[in-house]
Amino acid sequence: MATLSGFFGFLAVLLATVGLYGVLSYTVAQRRNEIGIRMSLGADRLKIVKLIMGDAGILLAIGLGVGLLLALLGAKAASSMLFGLKPSDPVTIALAIAALGAVGTLASYLPARRAARQDPMAALRDE
């Protein structure tokens, strides 16, 4: 049962990672003209990456906050299934937040880097 639960947990993390990357890539693609205008007006690649990473960081912080709240509320209901753990184990929660933060940061950095490398004229001609 533990192996099956671990497999489904890994599958859930994989799907969440792919979904997060897809949403962020789509968001960056929608802002392609804006990024092209910013780059043609003098914004360098680092500023573009910071802009996209900042927006993604706000979404990540909101998601982690709401997720933490729901996890703490759901842990009370699932306390009978937690063997060897307390419902609000701080080490487990900290590791989960760190892992999700790392995945969110990486999933937002890749589209940001790709957007910063685009040619501003191609982005402006695209519309």
Image (cartoon, rainbow, N blue to C red):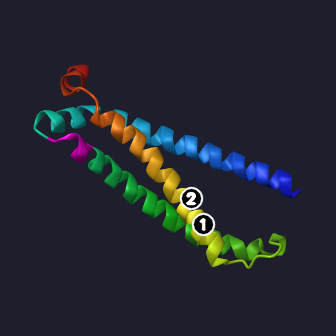
Magenta-span inclusion, residue 9: no
Instruction: Identify whether 14 is placed above or below 81.
Output: above
Residues under numbered marks 1 and 2 in contact, where contact means CB atoms less than 8 Å apart: yes
Residue 92 falls left or right of residue 44: right
Q: Image point 47% across, 41% down: which residue?
A: 23
- For the record, the magenta segment spans 43-48
Residue 105 falls left or right of residue 50: right
* x and y, in percent, of residue 43 in the image: 15, 41
Q: Residue furthest left?
A: 41
Instruction: Identify whether 125 is placed above or below 115.
Output: above
Q: Quadrant of the N terminus?
A: bottom right
* x and y, in percent, of residue 40 in the image: 13, 33
Q: Residue furthest right?
A: 1
Q: Quadrant of the C terminus?
A: top left
Disc 1 marks which residue?
95
Foreground residue, 118 or 70? 118
* Disc on res. 99: 2
What amino acid does circle 1 point to? Leu
Q: Quadrant of residue 33?
A: top left
Magenta-span inclusion, residue 47: yes
Question: Main SS type for the magenta part?
Answer: helix
Foreground residue, 68 or 89? 89
